[in-house]
Amino acid sequence: MENSEKTEVVLLACGSFNPITNMHLRLFELAKDYMNGTGKYEVIKGIISPVGDAYKKKGLISAHHRVIMAQLATKNSKWLEVDTWESLQQDWIETATVLRHHQEKLEASSRDHQQDSPVLERPGRKRKWAEQRQDFSQKKSLEQTKTKGVPKVKLLCGADFLESFGVPNLWKGEDITKIVGDYGLICVTRAGNDAQKFIYESDVLWKHQNNIHLVNEWITNDISSTKIRRALRRGQSIRYLVPDLVQEYIEKHSLYSSESEERNVGVILAPLQRKTAEADT
């Protein structure tokens, strides 16, 4: 299949990245290999979008530090980048809204690119005719941009994220529909995770199962941010679990401790706060 017939895909990962680990980076590589291997898609970019401080998760350190660590982790990558839009918002932003933001950004970029393409005037033609041709050309380009010409944003996640859809009051039903229906999921699963069974047991996920790509992680990697923070609290080495530059940054700023782990303790998670507030109105 020729490249022109493939759907260009941008992988978006939302989360705390508290701190970012080698496993987070591996998710992108696994997803890229899988999607490119289908012959239907071409992954052109990966975006890491750290959640803002308003998420209020226990032990969540400042977004300022989490963004910098993510930037250090992707410093040598040719296709991964860190986006700060979500982290800079004063209020917590739903994942569906973050997806929409990046999809609209891609659409705007494609329109700008099309509009910047010059239409050459043929010798001997009147300028009025050339202008009409240019208007028609731009209109046609915009129509093409709205269809297959614009890369598609898809949410990259792990099996735990997928299963969080089943946590009561954590997600809005309409947001789950938007995420899996309008954008799509690429979920990296491990041996022992029965993601397919979870999809089967959810009517919404089952309905949109063709837009959910399950990627098997055959080389298991059990690194997690929670385990990294635990090791740091106990004065244990985290080398080779996070990129070297991230380890250096953590040590330089003494980011994780027993005190930092108590941040937001007793505070209700932002999605649950919002759900409660909406129920009371």
Image: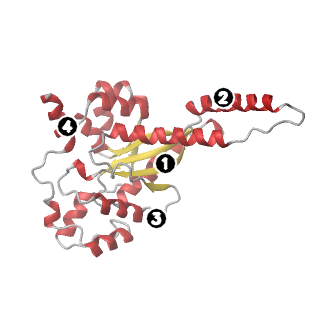
The tag on residue 141 is none
Say which label, 4 or 3, has the lower sequence index: 3
**Kind of residue indicated by mark 1:** Lys
Residue 171 lies left or right of residue 240; in this view the side is left
**Kind of residue indicated by mark 4:** Arg
Label 2 crowd (10 A; few <14 / some 14-19 / many >=20)? few
In front of the other: label 2 or label 3?
2
Q: Is residue 49 visible?
A: yes
The image quadrant where one finds the N terminus is top right
Label 3 crowd (10 A; few <14 / some 14-19 / many >=20)? few
Tag 1 secondary structure: helix
Gap between marks 2 and 1, in whole Å?
31 Å
The tag on residue 140 is 2
Gap between marks 4 and 1, in whole Å?
34 Å
**Kind of residue indicated by mark 2:** Lys
Gap between marks 3 and 1, in whole Å?
18 Å
Query: Which residue is label 4 attached to?
Result: 274
Say which label, 4 or 2, has the lower sequence index: 2
Say which label, 3 or 1, has the lower sequence index: 1
Gap between marks 4 and 2, in whole Å?
43 Å
Gap between marks 4 and 3, in whole Å?
36 Å
In front of the other: label 4 or label 1?
4
The tag on residue 32 is 1
- Splitting the image into 4 quarters, where does residue 109 fall? top right
Mark 4 vs 1: CB contact within 8 A = no
Tag 4 secondary structure: helix
Say which label, 2 or 3, has the lower sequence index: 3
The image quadrant where one finds the C terminus is top left
